[in-house]
Image (cartoon, grey):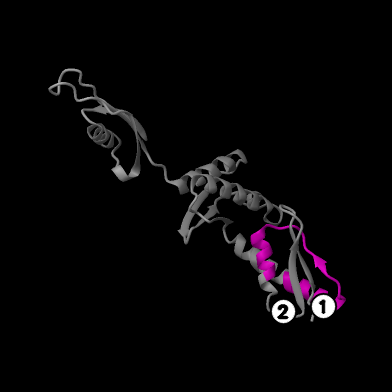
């Protein structure tokens, strides 16, 4: 039970009764006053009880994870989700079976799930700046792969004197490419295109 409607001689009495019924603390509930009631003449005649509806506040992070579980269950996967929160970032790690299908080609499925989780968080938890979704250590491996790709393409651009356009990727992956080549004074990187088809260009630096 996470919601109850109760009555009392006053709003405070009705709320206290609801808290007892729900087994909750006042700071963890939302109170809706339906009727403030009346004391009546001499406290008896014309008296009317106060009526309140009290709901237990849902953990917003758990709401986001429940949303993700629902999507993944429809995909035929029932994984476990591990949550960690730090500096306005919600990190969710997916653990279980059939995980490759949640990653998809070059992480496209995982990125789509992360995008949906971000939308859910923006709606339910406005104070979260970012949601990061991972499967095992996929993100770490993907970052290492992107850094190697960036270095290889930079060498190609320097050798051929021709710029290279990468495939479209989400902003946080483009940032990895940009960061990997920041110290390389022989090349420059920039993004072109519009979301979701924005991509990185590696070009010769102008001296």
Q: Residue at x 77, y 80 (%)?
A: 186
Q: Is 153 within the magenta?
A: yes
Horizontal and vertical percent for residue 73? 57, 40
Horizontal and vertical percent for residue 23? 28, 39
SS of the residue under disc 1: helix
**Magenta residues?**
150-178
Asked whether residue 79 is in view, the answer is: no
Q: Is residue 36 left or right of residue 65?
A: left
Horizontal and vertical percent for residue 65? 51, 46
> How many numbered marks, from 0 up?
2
Q: Which image quarter: residue 36?
A: top left
Q: Is residue 74 above or below residue 96?
A: above
Q: Which image quarter: residue 178?
A: bottom right
The residue that mark 2 highlights is 184
The dominant secondary structure in magenta is: helix
Q: Is residue 180 left or right of residue 186?
A: left
Q: Residue at x 60, y 46 (%)?
A: 116
Furthest residue in direction left, as rendered: 42
Between 99 and 146, the one lying in front of the other is: 146
Q: Is residue 52 left or right of residue 205?
A: left
Q: Is residue 25 left or right of residue 136?
A: left
Q: Is 88 within the magenta?
A: no
Q: Quadrant of the N terminus?
A: top left
Mark 1 → mark 2, Cα distance in angstroms: 11 Å
């Amino acid at each position: 039970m996470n919601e109850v409607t109760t009555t009392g001689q006053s709003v405070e009495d009705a709320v206290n009764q609801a808290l007892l019924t729900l087994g909750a603390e006042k700071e963890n509930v939302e109170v809706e006053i339906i009727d403030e009631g009346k004391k009546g003449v001499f406290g008896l005649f014309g008296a009317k009880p106060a009526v309140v509806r009290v709901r237990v506040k849902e953990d917003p992070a758990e709401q986001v994870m429940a949303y993700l579980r629902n999507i993944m269950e429809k995909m035929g996967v029932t994984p476990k989700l591990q949550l960690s929160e730090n500096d306005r970032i919600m990190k969710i790690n997916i653990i279980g079976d059939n995980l490759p299908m949640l990653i998809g080609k070059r992480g496209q499925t995982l990125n789509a799930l992360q995008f949906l989780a971000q939308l859910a968080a923006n709606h339910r938890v406005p104070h979260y700046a970012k949601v990061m979704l991972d499967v095992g250590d996929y993100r770490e491996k993907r970052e290492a792969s992107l850094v190697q790709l960036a270095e290889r393409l930079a060498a190609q651009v320097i050798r051929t004197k021709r710029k290279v356009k990468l495939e479209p990727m989400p902003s946080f992956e483009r940032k990895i490419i940009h960061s990997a080549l920041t110290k390389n004074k022989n090349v420059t990187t920039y993004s072109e295109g519009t979301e979701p088809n924005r991509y990185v260009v590696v070009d010769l630096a102008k001296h």
